[in-house]
């Protein structure tokens, strides 16, 4: 029985994301020294969030990463993918590693129907962040904790099997879905602007505390452990401002204390000085409302000490 006999699905063609592969004999060792995530401990059936930083601990790119045959796959925004491949290639040196920007189709699909989502199907992972790697398609089940009532959200990279695929009835829905989960895969204008903690990457398991050295690790660790987390990311809405753009500042008492980093034209992710999270916030003199995220936005206990 096709899963489409049980419920209607939304299929979104994603043109704003890219698939990058990192393969070769030294791929794991190379990424272990470049990413905040502990890729050596990443199981073959699991995906994880990760960031690559510069030596000052600033996030160059954030991604979804998982294992593929002979290496790893990463999902990145289109605007930053080629630049990040070029940047990482500068560190390859004599390592047996090949980075490639792939042309594979990327599809985001979701359903509110629990029966449809839970139908037995090897290419439909059962748990959030589970991964299926097949010959023609890779499927990742995303977190689905938002208030939209979606029982399951998925990303497919490659050719979806015919018995799983419906007609595209949407376009570029993935970015908003990630925003609602409090996940920022940053675009090129935000590259090298923020420490990982400002993007809540430590709150979604993207920073491995005891993995050892990686580029930017000293700054990231000091920020986490010595009470230096000053900014956090929030989901907001400003009903009186149409199409709020990334880069717009958020004000507290006429002083800029935050900045929008991603927007879907209605909701937006913004980075704010943490001490002002309970203050009245404004965008273009209009009130901003902070919306709940599926995780609690806190700072490390060292900040509060």
Image (cartoon, rainbow, N blue to C red):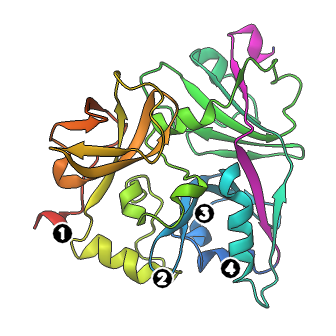
Which mark is in front, 1 or 2? 1
Residue range corresponding to the magenta coloring? 2-24
Instruction: Work out whether residue 16 or residue 203 is closer to the camera in this orientation and state it.
Output: 16
User: Are there few (<14), some (14-19), or many (20+) residues within 10 Å of tag 1?
Assistant: few
Q: CA distance from mark 2 to mark 3?
A: 15 Å
Residue 88, horizontal then vertical, whole percent? 69, 75
Toward the left, the furthest residue is 305
- What element does badge 2 sit on? loop
Residue assigned mark 2:
212
Queried whether the magenta region covers residue 197, the answer comes back as no
Q: Is residue 170 left or right of residue 253?
A: right
* Circle 3 residue: 42
Residue 45, percent across and down? 67, 52
Instruction: Name the residue carrying label 4.
Output: 30
Choose the circle earlier in sequence order: 1 or 3.
3
Which quadrant is home to the N terminus?
Answer: top right
């Amino acid at each position: 029985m096709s899963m489409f006999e049980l419920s209607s699905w939304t299929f979104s063609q994603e043109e704003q994301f890219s698939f990058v592969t990192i393969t070769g004999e030294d791929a794991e060792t190379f990424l272990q020294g470049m990413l905040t995530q502990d890729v050596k401990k990443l199981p073959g059936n699991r995906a994880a969030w990760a960031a690559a930083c510069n030596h000052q601990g600033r996030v160059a790119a954030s991604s979804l990463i998982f294992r593929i045959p002979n290496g790893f796959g990463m999902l990145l925004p289109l605007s930053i993918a080629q630049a990040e491949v070029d940047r990482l290639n500068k560190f390859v040196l004599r390592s047996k590693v090949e980075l490639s920007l792939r042309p594979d189709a990327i599809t985001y699909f979701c359903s509110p129907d629990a029966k449809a989502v839970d139908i037995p199907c090897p290419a439909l992972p059962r748990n959030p962040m589970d991964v299926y790697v097949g010959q023609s398609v890779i499927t990742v089940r995303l977190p689905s904790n938002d208030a939209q009532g979606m029982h399951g959200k998925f990303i497919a990279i490659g050719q979806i099997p015919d018995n799983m695929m419906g007609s595209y009835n949407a376009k570029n829905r993935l970015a908003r879905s990630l925003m609602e989960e409090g996940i920022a895969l940053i675009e090129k204008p935000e590259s090298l602007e923020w420490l990982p903690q400002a993007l809540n990457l430590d709150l979604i398991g993207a920073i491995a505390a005891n993995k050892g050295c990686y580029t930017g690790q000293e700054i990231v660790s000091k920020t986490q452990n010595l009470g230096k987390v000053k900014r956090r990311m929030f989901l907001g809405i400003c009903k009186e401002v149409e199409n709020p753009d990334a880069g717009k500042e958020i004000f507290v008492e006429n002083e800029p204390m935050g900045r929008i980093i991603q927007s879907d034209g209605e909701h937006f992710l913004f980075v704010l000085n943490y001490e002002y999270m309970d203050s009245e916030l404004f965008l273009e003199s209009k009130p901003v409302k902070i919306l709940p995220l599926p995780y609690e936005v806190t700072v490390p206990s060292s900040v509060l000490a």
